[in-house]
């Protein structure tokens, strides 16, 4: 697992994916995926260490599947059973993980796996997608409601636990976005509530990332940190393309210091270049319309939408895109 993480941090995604698959198979051969109740002869801290290692592998596999667009390990998903494997009272508490964190993170991993398999494992979105999305959103709401009080962002958080608790809620909001982002650019009544849910989850994600950045808890070389920053920035960009207001321009400019933490990643440098390109174009557009870039302006519902297709076409022909070394990136 450590080798897989190192490969990912060096942007060797294919090698990281292969190594992680090997780690999962080795873990299964050692029985780490079995119900902890069968390890009756093991000491309690050994049992918990095995349990934590298995779910760390599962979580990394799921997050990697989300970030590089590949399906999670189906055998892992079918074997994990929340009603048996998550009955674990944590004893081995370390300074950076609050009590109950591992169980909550593992439960969230199961939900993300279900989302990926039910919505993203097919060539096209299933016709029953709306009902699936509603059902999975209810599961996420239930998960959030069942969180222990000290794992909620509204509770006082010890400085050493801030990253763990923030990351837990960041993953939750990314789950909501994973479910609702296909509706983001739609405007019919059917998708309205999903669109609002996606935008709200993005705002919460941005708030969490800003807090992590302010406290120096965002890594510039960690693959998963970079993917959270980039995916949140992508949704923010789509929101701005949909509603190109002075208020959204201010949000983009406010996010740029966080986006710049991904400059060590090739895809991060592409994102930074294009975001600057788009900010300049949007500023020119607002100035040509006589809008002040410092005022919040009218509500989003009063702004005429720009041509999204043309904006994407401009990106495909921009220097940031055409000059990017895609062959190296896709290795």
Image (cartoon, helix red, strand yellow):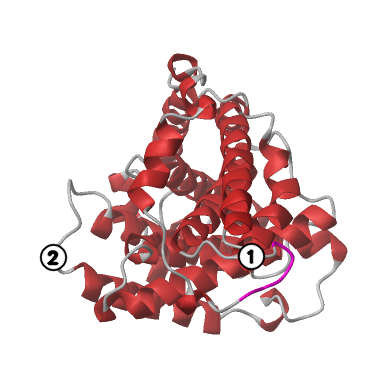
Residue that carries the numbered disc 2 in the rendered image: 127
Residue that carries the numbered disc 1 in the rendered image: 291
Residue 295 lies within the magenta run: yes
Per the rendering, the mark at residue 212 is none
Residue at 48 percent across and 27 percent down: it is 321
Is 134 placed above or below 324 here?
A: below
Front tag of 1 and 2: 1
Number of disc labels = 2
Q: Secondary structure at mark 1?
A: loop
Q: Is residue 75 visible?
A: yes
Is 234 placed above or below 84 here?
A: above
Q: Is residue 87 visible?
A: no
Q: Residue furthest left?
A: 127
Q: Secondary structure of the magenta portion, mostly?
A: loop
Front position in the image: 150 or 132: 132
Residue at 41 percent across and 59 percent down: it is 178
Q: Are marks 1 and 2 in contact (CB under 8 Å)?
A: no
- Residue 173 image point, x, y percent: 53, 66
Residue at 45 percent across and 43 percent down: it is 61
**First in sequence: mark 1 or mark 2?**
2
Question: Dot 1 surroundings within 10 Å: few (below 14), some, or many (20 or more)?
Answer: some
């Amino acid at each position: 697992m450590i080798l897989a993480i190192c490969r990912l941090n060096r942007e060797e995604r294919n090698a990281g994916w292969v190594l992680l698959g090997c780690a999962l198979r080795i873990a299964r051969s050692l029985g780490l995926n079995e119900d902890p109740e069968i390890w009756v002869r093991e000491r309690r801290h050994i049992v918990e260490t095995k349990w934590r290692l298995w779910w760390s592998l599962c979580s990394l596999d799921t997050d990697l599947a989300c970030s590089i667009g590949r399906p999670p390990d189906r055998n892992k998903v079918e074997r994990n059973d929340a009603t048996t494997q998550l009955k674990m009272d944590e004893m081995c508490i370390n300074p950076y993980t609050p009590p109950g964190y591992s169980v909550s993170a593992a439960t969230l991993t199961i939900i993300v796996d279900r989302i990926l398999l039910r919505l993203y494992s097919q060539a096209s979105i299933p016709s029953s997608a709306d009902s699936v999305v509603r059902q999975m959103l209810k599961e996420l709401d239930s998960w959030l409601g069942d969180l222990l009080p000290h794992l909620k962002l509204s509770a006082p958080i010890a400085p050493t636990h801030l990253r763990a608790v923030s990351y837990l809620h960041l993953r939750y909001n990314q789950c909501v976005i994973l479910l609702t982002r296909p509706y983001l650019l739609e405007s019919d009544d059917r998708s309205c509530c999903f669109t609002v849910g996606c935008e709200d989850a993005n705002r919460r994600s941005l708030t969490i990332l800003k807090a992590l950045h302010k406290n120096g808890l965002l890594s510039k070389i960690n693959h998963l940190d970079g993917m959270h920053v980039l995916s949140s920035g992508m949704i923010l960009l789509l929101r701005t393309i949909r509603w190109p207001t002075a208020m959204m321009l201010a949000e983009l400019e406010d996010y740029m210091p966080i986006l710049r933490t991904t400059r060590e990643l090739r895809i991060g440098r592409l994102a930074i270049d294009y975001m600057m390109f788009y900010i300049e174009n949007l500023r020119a557009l607002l100035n040509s319309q006589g809008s002040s870039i410092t005022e919040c302006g009218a509500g989003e519902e009063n702004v005429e939408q720009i041509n999204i297709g043309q904006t994407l076409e401009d990106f495909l022909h921009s220097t940031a895109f055409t000059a990017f070394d895609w062959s190296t990136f896709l290795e």
